[in-house]
Image (tube, rainbow, N blue to C red):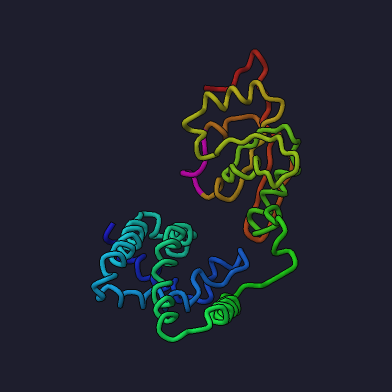
């Protein structure tokens, strides 16, 4: 735990000022935090020394530090180049936003009279410095086409019949409302070991059960599942992108005299 914290905490702190984070490129972003917001956030520590606000500010900082220490010490955070630290940092949004607003509030009180103009200028500065690309499709539902990894799973899902049950590591995609008139069902690949009886029942009674074998499943013997490997399957198709490869198999329904091996 201590080793994880010592290895991960500096990396997560650097994310506040990293303006070219490769983990975010797939999502069309360059940075997790705008550097100006990060600067205001850390400047808020000055308010800890003001008697009137010190308790309130300390309470919000305590919330941030609790999350920071917890997720920096979490064992998967040793994967410094993994996406986990980005996912965990979502918890920081509320305390960071509140604390970053304190210096702004002070600036408004002391130096700014035309608040509307100030906020308009601030908005433009933040927009221009955040590395965002404004496109006409910004306000369209583009969940099925972006980012590339998820888009490949959506494409694979939409190549299956609409009444199928799909076993996959991305178990939310087959039931997403981003797919029009979607009647598919899903089984979480990582829970199959714990619900084998329910999976057997689904295979025996469903007209269509499909398994998406992807890179996560094929990464090593620990990831693979003996129960799934032992099922009779029929190859359907393979989809590849730069980031993921998905092979779809239709799981054959056992005959009445040949139940699924238990």
Q: From what the image shows, is residue 110 above or below residue 68?
A: below
Magenta stretch: dominant SS? loop
Q: Is residue 73 visible?
A: no
Q: How many marks?
A: 0
Residue 225 drawn in magenta: yes
> Picture coordinates of residue 189 (x, y %)?
55, 39
Viewer-proximal residue among 170 and 246 = 170
Q: Quarter of the image containing the N terminus?
A: bottom left
Residue 120 drawn in magenta: no
Residue at 49%, 44% (x, y): give it.
223
Residue 213 lies in what quarter of the image? top right
Residue at 74%, 35% (x, y): give it.
162
Range covered by the magenta-colored residues: 220-226
Residue 4 lies in what quarter of the image? bottom left
Q: From what the image shows, is residue 154 above or below residue 6?
A: above
> Picture coordinates of residue 123 (x, y %)?
57, 76
Viewer-proximal residue among 42 and 81 = 42
Q: From what the image shows, is residue 23 above or below residue 44?
A: above
């Amino acid at each position: 735990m201590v080793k994880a914290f010592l290895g991960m905490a500096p990396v997560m702190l650097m994310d506040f000022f990293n303006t070219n984070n490769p983990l975010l490129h797939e999502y069309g972003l360059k940075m997790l935090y705008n550097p100006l917001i990060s600067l205001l956030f850390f400047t808020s520590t000055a308010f800890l020394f003001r008697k009137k606000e010190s308790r309130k500010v300390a309470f919000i900082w305590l919330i941030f530090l609790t999350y920071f220490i917890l997720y920096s010490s979490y064992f998967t955070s040793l994967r410094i180049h993994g996406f986990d630290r980005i996912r965990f940092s979502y918890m920081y949004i509320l305390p960071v936003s509140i604390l970053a607003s304190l210096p702004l509030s002070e600036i408004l009180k002391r130096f700014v009279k035309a608040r509307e103009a100030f906020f308009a200028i601030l908005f433009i500065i933040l927009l221009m410095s955040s590395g965002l690309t404004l496109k006409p499709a910004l306000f369209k539902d583009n969940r099925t086409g972006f980012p590339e990894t998820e888009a490949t799973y959506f494409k694979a899902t939409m190549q299956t019949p609409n009444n199928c049950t799909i076993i996959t590591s991305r178990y939310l995609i087959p039931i997403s409302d981003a797919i029009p008139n979607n009647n598919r069902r899903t089984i979480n690949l990582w829970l199959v070991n714990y619900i084998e009886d329910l999976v057997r029942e689904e295979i025996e009674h469903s007209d269509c059960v499909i398994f998406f074998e992807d890179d996560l499943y094929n990464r090593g013997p620990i990831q693979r599942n003996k129960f799934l490997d032992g099922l009779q399957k029929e190859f359907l198709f393979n989809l590849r992108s730069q980031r993921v490869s998905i092979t779809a198999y239709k799981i054959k329904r056992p005959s009445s005299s040949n139940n699924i091996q238990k």
